């Protein structure tokens, strides 16, 4: 155990980090051991990771000294921020900066920074196709991450920039599952027109990250993107119909209608889907299925994910 290289995993009790801890610990012959970073080492989720053999270390991304302690002695780190915990792109950037500083301080040899596009590269604030939000963002939960990409390389931290995709788990946990419309028919609703929506099983993000760490630094200095599949709304609805044995339709709404749905972050997500729709080639092109499968041979398709998870999907 002692000769293993340590990967410090931020968000280890969550979706992305949890997948990585489980991927590392399920490969006992592999070169790594996971150090699970959590704010509460005694939580049931943290203890479940300890039972897999992960080291548990308490730290908070908002406490730079705790991060330095958590990264000390490690070979690498998986760095992720938690937009939906605070809805602040500025805070995400401060957290990314603190993680980059801690990585430099610890002399880490490989960091994976989990990020998304700064959409303002394609949709400047002057572009009125979608509203500017919070005064200076188009898609706040994307832009805050993308504007932080340079912080790692800027400090000379050996980094792979990882573009993630829409979690299919949102159909379970984010209220995006099939709902009955006024006509009584089930539908999934996205403002994507006939364009493709790259998606992934959240667990596969960590497994892909494990594959990236296993490439011995070959992907340092690179930006890579991952997805399990690039289905359209119609294709996802057809997959739901097959999996649930009930007709599920695709309800294509205009982005402005989606932005007006009223739940927290609806405007942000409306802009996000519009960005993915209007820049389909850019967005899909940055998320190669071939690369994702090469990093993670167990990568799930949407059908496979649905079959494994359909019992957990709330259908209203
Ligand atoms: N939903 C999607 O489709 C999607 C797609 C791509 C990217 N993303 C991005 O993914 C990010 C979230 O990652 P995730 O889904 O893996 O998170 P998650 O499942 O919500 O888990 C977050 C974990 O991080 C820990 N955490 C929260 N605040 C922390 C803090 N201040 N310091 C240290 N740890 C903290 C919590 O663990 P403890 O309570 O144990 O500390 C929690 O278990 C978001 O920024 C989101 O924008 C989401």
Image: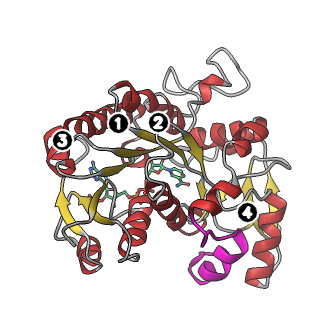
Residue tagged 2: 145
Give how far across and how far down residue 302 sits, in percent. Answer: 70, 69
Which stretch did the figure color magenta? 296-316
| Element under disc 4 | strand
Q: Dot 3, how many residues are within 10 Å of its Cα: few (below 14), some (14-19), or many (20+)?
A: few
Which image quadrant: the N terminus?
Answer: bottom left
Residue drawn at x 70%, y 41% is 283
Using the rendered view, name the quadrant where residue 86 is placed.
top left
Residue 221 counted in the magenta span = no
Residue drawn at x 43%, y 55% is 213
| Element under disc 1 | helix
Give how far across and how far down residue 60 sits, in percent. Answer: 21, 48
| Element under disc 3 | loop
Labels 1, 4: front one: 1
| Element under disc 2 | helix
Image quadrant of ligand 1 equals: bottom left
Q: Are marks 2 and 1 in contact (CB under 8 Å)?
A: yes
Q: Dot 4, how many residues are within 10 Å of its Cα: few (below 14), some (14-19), or many (20+)?
A: many
Residue drawn at x 48%, y 26% is 134
Q: Are marks 1 and 4 in contact (CB under 8 Å)?
A: no
Q: CA distance from mark 2 to mark 1?
A: 8 Å
Q: CA distance from mark 1 to mark 4?
A: 34 Å
Q: Are marks 2 and 3 in contact (CB under 8 Å)?
A: no
Residue tagged 1: 96
Residue tagged 4: 188
Residue 316 visible here: no
- Kindly tell me whether mark 2's CB lies below 8 Å from ligand 1: yes
Give how far across and how far down residue 93 sits, in percent. Answer: 37, 32
Which callout, 2 or 3, points at the residue further toward the start of the chain?
3
Which callout, 4 or 3, points at the residue further toward the start of the chain?
3
């Amino acid at each position: 155990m002692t000769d293993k290289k340590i990967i410090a995993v931020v968000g280890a009790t969550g979706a992305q980090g949890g997948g990585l801890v489980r991927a590392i610990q399920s490969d006992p012959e592999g070169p790594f051991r996971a150090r699970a970073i959590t704010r509460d080492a005694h939580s049931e989720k943290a203890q479940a990771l300890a039972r897999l053999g992960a080291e548990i270390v308490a730290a908070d991304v908002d406490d730079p000294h705790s991060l330095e302690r958590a990264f000390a002695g490690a070979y690498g780190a998986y760095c992720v921020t938690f937009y939906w915990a605070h809805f602040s792109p500025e805070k995400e950037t401060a957290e990314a900066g603190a993680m980059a500083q801690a990585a430099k301080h610890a002399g880490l040899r490989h960091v994976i920074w989990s990020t998304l596009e700064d959409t303002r590269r394609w949709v400047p604030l002057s572009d009125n196709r979608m509203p500017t939000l919070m005064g200076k963002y188009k898609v706040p939960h994307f832009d805050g991450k993308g504007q932080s990409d340079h912080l790692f390389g800027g400090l000379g931290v050996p980094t792979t920039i990882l573009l993630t995709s829409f979690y299919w788990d949102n159909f379970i946990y984010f209220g995006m599952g099939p709902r009955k419309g006024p006509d009584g028919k089930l539908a999934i609703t996205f403002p994507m027109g006939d364009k493709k929506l790259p998606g992934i099983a959240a667990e596969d993000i960590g497994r892909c990250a494990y594959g990236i760490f296993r490439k011995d630094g070959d992907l340092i200095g690179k930006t890579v993107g991952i997805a399990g599949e690039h289905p359209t709304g119609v294709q996802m609805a057809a997959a739901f119909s097959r999996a649930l044995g009930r007709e599920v339709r695709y309800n294509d709404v205009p982005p402005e209608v989606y932005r007006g749905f009223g739940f927290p972050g609806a405007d942000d997500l409306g802009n996000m889907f519009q960005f993915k729709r209007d820049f389909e080639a850019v967005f899909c092109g940055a998320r190669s299925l071939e690369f994702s499968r090469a990093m993670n041979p167990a990568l799930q398709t949407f059908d496979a994910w649905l079959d494994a998870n359909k019992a957990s999907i709330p259908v209203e």
